[in-house]
């Protein structure tokens, strides 16, 4: 069974920074860290940053230039560095993994990020 465990959420003032982390474990072993999505109540979950198998990043327009996604050599750990945070970045952030063999996506339990003064 695949597990994705997030950490690093919390409360931060506008203009501040947070760093989210994600750890992928379990089977199938072909699941790798793939990206971050966020969701606010009443809206669909949206990807904010993703990595393909070659670790090439892709960002949503709303976060480009402020957020940076990264992974390690095993592709089992991922991070999201969030700078210049805005109140509209407030959401539950989910770590996503993808099965390299099947293309199936897996999700973590989510971590709350609140940007407020």
Image: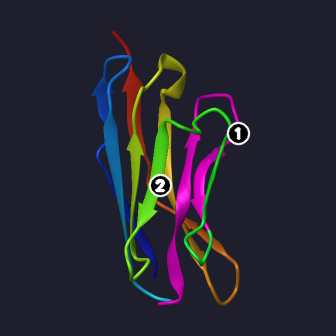
First reached walking from the N terminus: tag 1 or tag 2: 1
- Where is 1 relative to 64, above or below? below
Q: On screen, 46 above or below 14?
A: below
Picture quarter with the C terminus = top left
Q: Is residue 97 visible?
A: yes
In the picture, residue 41 is in which quadrant? top right
Question: Depth-wise, is mark 1 or mark 2 nearer the camera?
Answer: 2
Q: Is residue 9 visible?
A: no
**Which residue has dot 1 on it?**
44
Residue sitting at 46 percent across and 88 percent down? Answer: 27
Membership of 43 in magenta stretch: yes
Image quarter of residue 50: bottom right
> Taken as a whole, is the magenta stretch helix, strand or loop?
strand
Q: CA distance from mark 1 to mark 2?
A: 21 Å
| Spot occupied by residue 82 in the image (x, y as percentages of width and height) | 41, 39
Q: Is residue 31 above or below residue 85?
A: below
User: Label 2: which residue?
Assistant: 69
Q: Residue at x 49, y 35 (%)?
A: 66
Image location of residue 28, percent across then percent down = 51, 89
Instruction: Please state the horizontal and vertical placement of residue 51, each as a whole percent of the image.
Output: 58, 65
Per the rendered image, the range of residues in magenta is: 29-51
In the figure, 27 relative to 109: above or below? Answer: below
SS at mark 1 in the image: loop
Given residues 23 and 41, the one toward you in this image is 23
Within-10-Å neighbours for mark 2: few <14, some 14–19, many 20+: many
């Amino acid at each position: 069974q695949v597990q994705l465990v997030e950490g690093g959420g919390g409360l931060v003032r506008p203009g501040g920074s947070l760093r989210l982390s994600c750890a992928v474990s379990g089977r199938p072993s072909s699941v790798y860290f793939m990206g971050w999505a966020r969701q606010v109540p009443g809206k669909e979950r949206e990807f904010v940053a993703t990595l393909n198998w070659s670790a090439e990043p892709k960002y949503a327009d709303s976060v480009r230039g402020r957020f940076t996604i990264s992974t390690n050599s095993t592709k089992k750990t991922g991070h999201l560095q969030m700078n210049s945070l805005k109140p509209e970045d407030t959401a539950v952030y989910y770590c996503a993994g993808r099965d390299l063999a099947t293309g199936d996506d897996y999700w973590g339990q989510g971590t709350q990020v609140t940007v407020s003064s």
